[in-house]
Amino acid sequence: MKRHLVVKLRHRLPEPVPYWVTFIGDKSVEVLSLTRAVDAVLHQAGLEFWVTSEYQPAGAEWAEVERHHGLDRTYRLVLSTDASVSTEVVAAVAALPEVESAHQLDVAGSPVAPPRLAVAASVGGQRAELTGLDFAHALTRGRSDVTVAVLDTGVNLAHPELRGKVVARADFVDLEGLDTAGFIGDTLGYDEDPEDELGHGTHVAGIVAGEGRGMDPGVAPGCRLMAVRVLATLRDGDTVQGAGVVDNINPAIKWAVDQGADVINMSLGIRHTGGGLPHADVIRYALARGVTVVAASGNDGTDTKYYPGALPGVIAVGAVDDDGSVASFTSWGAPITVVAPGVNVLSSYARGTYAVASGTSQAAPFVSGSVALMKSLARDHGHDLPATAVVHLLRETSDRVDRRPRSPHAGYGLVNLTDSFKWLLGSLN
């Protein structure tokens, strides 16, 4: 098993190193030294390695915003033998003066609530009335130049609800060298085929931008999608879940930003198990580039923090039922921003089918689609809506669940697109 060690230095190396995504398949350029001190620690432990870059620049050179968030000085050390790296060795590397942080890769799962396959039908009328979606659709159904990146288990590209809507695609799942005995389907190779084997990502994509052929239209059917596969299918007993390498999600986030995503939807979440907070650097980069990041708060009904939802600046979303009551499964450890419909939601599913599913995974894309509509309306009036303005808009216009300005279980309340669009129109005119 070839391990990877991610090391963030305090200063960038003077010479370029190969990007790890391409290096896995092309080792024609080899860099065998990081710093003298890091090399010494690893060599003393009997470890040989290749040095690769964790990220690649958006342009020909690293931009100031990339350097500011340390993306240019984050490296991935790929061990050249099937050796293990002890926690003591990782700690020794992390303790070096020139090292800002160091950790090994970790495989994490994102449990998926079992869906119910369904004959396509309309079950979303209450949701449109509950959130003011009909009012929003009277003003815009979204612009084709506003794009939502769905980072998930992939997308069924040929689904009738989504055909022709995906303008960029990538598959960042690669579990080479790891124990994949419990995984089903595609687990190897970075490519442009994000086909969804599980169905979760397709369900999310349909909520964002489904055409409405055999179901209610998505929230922003006029907008476009990026299909970014970051989770493979893992069988756990009688259930399946999305699972993948946590650090492999990071370059996927950066790829979506650099490809021009306006909104990133992450209906997934992992616990923090040590080291730096998951995705923190690259999420800060996304926000600095004006991209709105929306994430599910979690589905265990506890105060457990799931990431990226618990990171500052991310819009963490909880779920409500058709009566507007917060669903009992909504986790509230992440500082929830708003809640949205997430119970018994019909949407597109794998292999051209439809399914009904519940979860904060379903509530998050409702908010992502809502943000895409807001950005579309602003763009119609010649303005761009930055990430900070989106959060302010949601905070000021959502329907509070009680008298408190913010509730731990519901954030600033239920999304109210009627009020948010009126507020937005007032500020644009």
Image: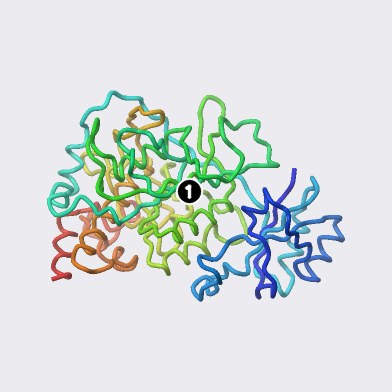
Q: Vertically, is 145 above or below 318?
A: below
Q: Quadrant of residue 353?
A: top left
Q: In this rendering, would 121 be left or right of 272?
A: left
Count of numbered labels shown in the rendering: 1
Q: Residue at x 23, y 40 (%)?
A: 217
Could you tell me residue 214's position as x and y percent?
24, 30
Q: Vertically, is 182 above or below 246?
A: above
Q: Vertically, is 149 above or below 282?
A: above
- Indicate the secondary structure of the residue bearing disc 1: loop
- As rendered, which of 240 and 250 lies closer to the eye? 250
**10 Å crowding of disc 1: few (<14), some (14-19), many (20+):** many
Quarter that holds the N terminus: top right
Could you tell me residue 278's position as x and y percent?
54, 57
Q: Residue at x 63, y 65 (%)?
A: 74
Q: In this rendering, would 273 be left or right of 382?
A: right
Residue ID for mark 1: 269
| Colour style of the rendered protein structure | rainbow
- As rendered, which of 57 and 109 lies closer to the eye? 57
Q: In this rendering, would 6 be left or right of 130?
A: right
Could you tell me residue 89's position as x and y percent?
78, 59
Quarter that holds the C terminus: bottom left
Q: Residue at x 84, y 66 (%)?
A: 40
- As rendered, which of 36 and 237 lies closer to the eye? 36
Residue type, mark 1 in image:
Gly
Q: Quadrant of residue 183?
A: top right
Could you tell me residue 326's position as x and y percent?
29, 45
Q: Residue at x 25, y 45 (%)?
A: 221
